[in-house]
Structures are given as C-alpha cells and as structure tokens.
Image: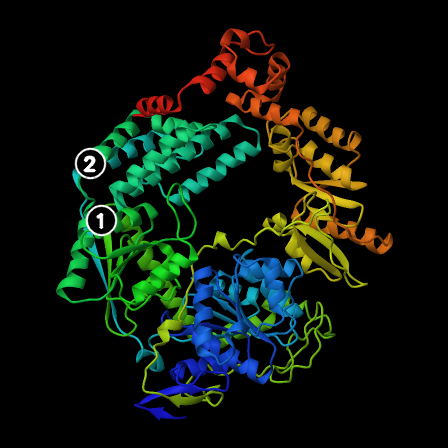
Amino acid sequence: MAVTDDVAYVEHPLLNPSFIQRRLYQIQLAGAARTDDTLVCLPTGLGKTTVSLLVTATRLHDIGGKALFLAPTKPLVQQHADFYREALSIPDEEIVVFTGSVRPDDRAAVWDDATIVIATPQVVENDLVGNRISLADVTHLTFDECHRGTGEYAYVYIAERYHADASKPLVTGMSASPGGNKEDILTVCENLGLDRVEVMSEEDADVSEYTHDTAVEWKRIDLPAELLEIRDLLNKVITERLQSLKELGVTNATSPDISQKQLNTIGGKLRRLIDNDKSEGYQGMSVHAEVMKLKRAVELVETQSVESVRRYFDRQRNAARSSGASKASQRLVADPNVRRAMRKAETYDKLHPKFSQTRILLAETLGINGGDRVIVFTESRDTAEALTEFLSESFDAQRFVGQGNKEGSPGMTQKQQQETLNAFRNGEFTVLVSTSVAEEGLDVPEVDLVLFYEPVPTAIRSIQRKGRTGRQDEGRVVVLMAEDTRDEAYFWISRRKEQQMESELRELKQLATDVETELSAGTQSGLSSFDADSADGDTDRTDTTEGTDTPARSGSTEQREKPAPQSRSHTNGQPGLTDFGMKSESDDTDESASESESESKPNPDDTTPDEETESGGIVATAGTADDDQVEVVIDQRELDSTIARDLSTREGITTRLETLAVGDYVLSDRVAVERKSVDDFLDTLTGTDRSMFEQVGDLARNYSRPVVIIEGTDLYGTRNIHPNAIRGAVSSLAIDYGVSILRTEDEQDTTEMLAMIARREQEVRERSVRVHGEKTTKTLAEQQEYVVSSIADIGPVTAEALLNHFGTVEEVMTARKDDLLEVTGVGNVTADRIRDVIGSSYAEQSATDDTENE
C-alpha cells in the first residue's frame, strides 16, 4: 500500500494506478464476492459497481476468460462501460457494449475477442436463444439492479443458462434495495443462483464515514378552488360510473376515492363474466375503462399541473374522434360534467401551486444559499415539459426524459441523454427536470437539492431518488404534497414501505447466515438440476481459483468446493483484505461516479433489430448443428413468448434466431410451423392485413409439411363467433391448403410439441433444416380492393362490387351518390359515408369535430 496526501488507492495489476480509492467496506465485500455467488446490498451512492469491478479484475487476472456485466437500460450500460474503461488497464476495444442499437451479427463477431461485455439483458437473452454467443468462458457475471430477477425478466433466463453452460461460473448480484421482505430476497437469490448475502448499511462504521444526512422535508400545498371544482366535476362522473358497475354486481363501492387495488378486483370480475360469455362483462369493461381514464384525470388535476390536464383532455378528444374509437372514449368526452371540467381547465390561467413552490425552492437553493445544481423529479412527462418551460424563465433548466415517443411528446435519444448529463455535470446548466428515467441508476452528479414534485409510493424508487444527494455533503430532499389528495396517500404508503424495507435489510443483515443456510438447504434445486455430471446431487462446484484450461461443456456444470459460510461480522477475518493492494495519489476520486442503479421497468428500446434477409427467395439457411444436436430455427418475433427460451435450454436442442418470411418455427427442410394463440387465430378470421389463409398459403407453397398450432383452450367460447364459422375455417385450412392442425393447451405444451416434431424429423427421418420461402405480394387486383375497402370501413365484399361496377379505383372515388346507389350492397348510409370521406375538406371537418366536442 502506498499513501499520498492521506488518500489511499487500490493497487492491482489490471487497475489503472490511483483511480479506485481504497474503502475498507468495498474491499471486504469484494473479498466475499470473489469466492461465492453473492448478493451485495449497499446503499445508493456507495460504490456497488466498484465492488463488482474489483471482483472482475481478480477473476480475469487469476483465471482468465471474460466478464459479462448486465444493466437494465442503455444509459446505464454506457455509463458502466465508461467507468470500466477508465478504471481498468484493459484496452478500450476489449471492453464492448451490447445493446439493441448494435446489430446481432456485429455482436456475434466481437463477442469472442471481447474481455468484458457490458450489455442490456434483452440482447444477451436474444443472442443466447439465437445461439450467437456462448457463456462457457464467462468467469464473472454481474447483475446490476438484481432485484429485477423475478418472473420472466431476462435476468432469470440468463442466470439459468450461465450456471448450466459456464466452465467456471461466479455471479455477483447488486442492489440498494433487493426486496420488501425476506421472501422476495430469497426469490431473487434462487432465480440468480446466489447463495451468499452481504449487507452493509449506513449504520456500519466503515460505511458511515462516506455518508451524510439527507434531510427530508414535506411541503404541504393547498389547491385553489378552481382546481377543486375541476376535480369535483370529474369525481361526480366517477361516482355515476361506479354506480353502474354496482348494478352489474361487481362492486359495492361508489366513492371516487376507490383504490387501484379495488379497481383491479373489479376488472378481474368483469373478465370472468366475459369468459362466461356474459354480455354484461363487455358492457362493464367499457365502463371500467372510463373510470380508469377519469381517475387519471383527477390525479393530474390534484398532483401535477394544469397543462398536463389540458394535454390529457386533448388526447382523449383526439382518441374519441379517431377511427375505431372505443365507446369509453366517446362517452367520456360527451359527458356534460367532463365537458365542463375541460372548459374550466382551458380557461384556468393561473399556475398550479406546485409550480410556484418549485420556483421558490430553486431560488432559495441556487440564489440565497449559493447552490450549484438541483434535480426536480416528476412522474408525468407532460409536467416535466411544462415545468422546464416555466422554470427556464428564471433558471437555466433542461428536461431529461426517456427514449420512447409518447403521445406527441418526443423522447430523447441515448446520445441526447448522455450529452445532457455531461452538460449538467460540467455546470453548463443548473436545473435538471427529469422523469423516472434518471431516478434509479444514472450517474447523476452531486446536487444541492432533490425536489420530488410528488411523493413516490414505491420504496425502492424513493430510496434511489434520495441517493442523488448527500454523497459528499449534507443534502436536502423536499417533497411537495397537495393537501387532501392522493399525494397524502402516497406519502403514507412511501413512508410505511421504506420503514419496512429498512427493517427487512436490518433483519437480513442479522440473519444473513440463516438465509444462506436456507438457500443451501434446497431452495435452489432448479439450479442443481443443471449439474448432470453429479451422481449424488451435490451442488458445490470446483474451486474458482484454478486455471482456465477447463473445457467448455453443454448443459452441465463442473463442481467446485465452496468454503463454509463465513461470519457476517466484518471486524474479524475480513475476507479479501489481502486480495487487493493499495496505491495512493493526491487526487481523491469519488466513488459516486461509478455508482449505478436502474429503472424499474424494462427498456423497450433494447429489442434486437431485425436481421437482413438474403436475396433470391431464400431468406436464411440455418447453420450446421452438431451431429447430436437437433436444430430449431425461430422467428425472432416469437421472443415475446417463453417458447424460444425454453427450447434453448433443452438438452440436445440448438436454437437459431432468424427473420423468417414464412412461418414461426422451422423444424426441417419440409416442416414449418405457424403458431397462433386462440385469440390470434380468431383475430385472423375477423380481419387483418394478412389473413390466416394468406399466411398459411405462403406456408403451404414453401413447405411440403406445413403445420398450424392453435394454442390455448376454449376455441369456440372465447369470442362471440359462431362455432360453425370456426369449424369451417379449420376444415378449410386442413382440406384446401393441406395443413396439419395441432392443438396445444399452453406455451409449455407447444414447446414439447415443437421439440417432438423436430426430433422426429431430424433424428428419426434424418432430415436437415433449411429455411426458405418468401411472402407473396398482393396482386394488382388485391391492392385495388384493399384501397377501396379502406374507405369508411366498407369491407372487401362491397369493395369488389364497386370495382366490378366502376372498373377503376379512380371511378369509384369520383362517383356521385346516385351512381354509388346503383351498386349492389350499397345503400344510402354507405353511399353517404363514402362521399363524406372522399369529398369533405379535412380542415373543415377537423374544425367541425372540434366544435362538436367542446
């Protein structure tokens, strides 16, 4: 250890000198995590990422292989990559980023040469299912924000594959808030294969010197009478709609303060009515949708801004005027009380009191107290945009929102997000107005004030938001709370959940050894099933400090012996203190620059882009599989189901993702499968751009043994479609198109069926896999029918009659009403609709609609 100016740094062959400040608690955690699959729980801002980096450096130096670091969002991935490149002496080109912005072929090409891959979980999941990458030589896998490792989130599948495929696996899970109770934490540990838990809190002596008090103030806001009038008008309509639902027998509650949990219960009862083919269910579901819309409007009035309410009402009016508008939207904008509420919102020319209070707090922080930076968090993008515009009159403020475009509100690209954060760090502006995208894990710089525009009902998000301040000096957190609104309810929910989580973490810290004992006593039986080479069921694995010459396997995990769980006391033993040396430098590098948390929702922008198809009608040819492997080629759009993931974990099956022009699964050179859920199947019968018969026609033209799988139960009772119509469609597919129709109960049953067919074709019949075919394009006549049928939704039959009568699309478009009436099937109503659509001025009609809806 070397010390300069009383600042000590970690020294390691793979670490850049004088970069990682030596903190005892981080060394202790890294020492524990380097030998066991470990859940690391550490408060936000205290360097969980540094702990993982130290483990990665040790594994790569001692064992070799590569490291994989997973984070839920693109900005987090880029942030971690930047930190790793700064901290490690590994060449920058060997630390690569995998997100949906990188083409699959490009990812596959650089995987083998990379030393560290930092990625979103969705793309890694897709690459594993598509057999583009192998986890065999990954010696350290990190799950950032590992509390996401539940249900069908990609973390769970990746962990399963990693423990099965890796030669020398080691997993580190990181979270500031892993769950609300011990059961949640155990679930995460089981899903990710973690058998050790290391918890440190701000109460630990080694940690407390790096934390500072974060004062939380609650500012109560009184709503003006005008806003209360808007709320009361909307609440009156909610009461009326709930009375209608009460008459249907699905609720006894008619108060507008009805909770979301109660509304969810009502929705469940209505779905059961629909399942039993009760017309009351459809009627009630429409009313239920209206109540949900009204509740959202009330929430905006009470807790957000008048501008957000106006924008919301505008969207509802536009939705009611659109083609195929729901009855709920149409009733909503037509209700007299809603219309009065809309007019009051339009004429209200004052600020929401939260706006004024926000400006006062910013002036106090940045002006009177001489602060440098402020972050304002809000749940609503509309509010974020309106607030940014308002604050920009007095301060240098910029918005920070997610990447998706939402109802006319443009998102920010990853580059724009990064540029905005860099500018904020560099002091180029002083106020960041952000939606939830920045609240969890982005490396937002130290700020003087974090302002919650509204309380946050989720403990995890609230804790992580507070982590944006109080890292170096005493910070300040202010929460605005509108009196007698749902803000107050959220306040109490937030406080209760945070207290509960703090209690659970303290309990977990005290009972960590017991948790580990419970995990090792059989709760991870799912992971032990991968250990096919073990005869006695022992799930321990071989020592990870061995060399890197262990051969890769498929579907099994070599064993390594683990030391017995060590004491939770960090005052004795201090595992790992000798694993990292220390180096000093005068410059004190703050760990917070490396800290990352994530959003609670998965990022939709991380979907793998479609692959390009080859020319000449052959879309793709699957690669040659091993002699003992059955290959299944899967259309990448099928990744929404669990089937592709399940098939990829089967012994003896290799999966490959392609952009299939025909079918969903290719099982041999002659068998391709079109999979339809019962709902999808019925949808194709009632009208889409490419009907079931077109899809099956393409399938039958390109494969000699086409198969249609209809997945689900109650084919004849799910929709209000006559059973004979369904039977006619099924018989037509079988007889006219020569397609085999197979029924399965669910996705699991479909998976078994696909695996069975593939094995019969490739193992018994010894047929190879070849993907071919292309979709047929519409003929000129079909395109003409499509254009005409889209007019006023008149449908294909009337379109054909019109074209037969007039001869061309142009003649149909220019025909007078009297001429239209001469066509069979065209009456006064249809003729009027056609002329209205074709002959009316768009501007005039739009203005008329606006007038009618005022």
Drawn side of residue 311 relative to residue 354, left or right: right
* Residue identified by numbered label 1: 390
Residue 614 horizontal/vertical position (percent): 69, 50
Up/down of 686 relative to 830, above or below: below
- Quadrant in which the C terminus is drawn: top left
For the residues marked 1 and 2, what is the alpha-carbon distance in whole angstroms?
A: 16 Å
Q: Quadrant of residue 781?
A: top right
Q: Residue at x 43, y 49 (%)?
A: 404
Drawn side of residue 185 relative to residue 106, left or right: left
Drawn side of residue 739 relative to residue 84, left or right: right
For the residues carrying marks 1 and 2, which lies nearer the camera in this image? 1
Q: Residue at x 42, y 80 (%)?
A: 26
Residue 403 horizontal/vertical position (percent): 42, 52
- Quadrant in which the N terminus is drawn: bottom left
Up/down of 723 relative to 358, above or below: above
- Secondary structure beneath label 1: helix
Query: Looking at the image, which residue sits at the far bottom?
Result: 2
Q: Amino acid at mark 1?
A: Phe
Mark 2 surroundings within 10 Å by alpha-carbon count, few (fewer than 14), some (14 through 19), many (20 or more): some
Q: Please report whichever mark, 1 or 2, sits nearer to the chain's N-terminal start.
A: 2
Q: Nearer the viewer, residue 30 or 800?
A: 800
Q: Nearer the viewer, residue 788 or 435?
A: 788
Residue 145 horizontal/vertical position (percent): 46, 65
Up/down of 10 relative to 298, above or below: below
Mark yes or no: residue 163 visible: yes
Q: Residue at x 46, y 74 (%)?
A: 84
Query: Looking at the image, which residue sits at the far left?
Result: 368
* Mark carried by residue 348: 2
Q: How is the image coloured?
A: rainbow
Mark 1 surroundings within 10 Å by alpha-carbon count, few (fewer than 14), some (14 through 19), many (20 or more): some
Mark yes or no: residue 157 visible: no
Up/down of 807 relative to 589, above or below: above
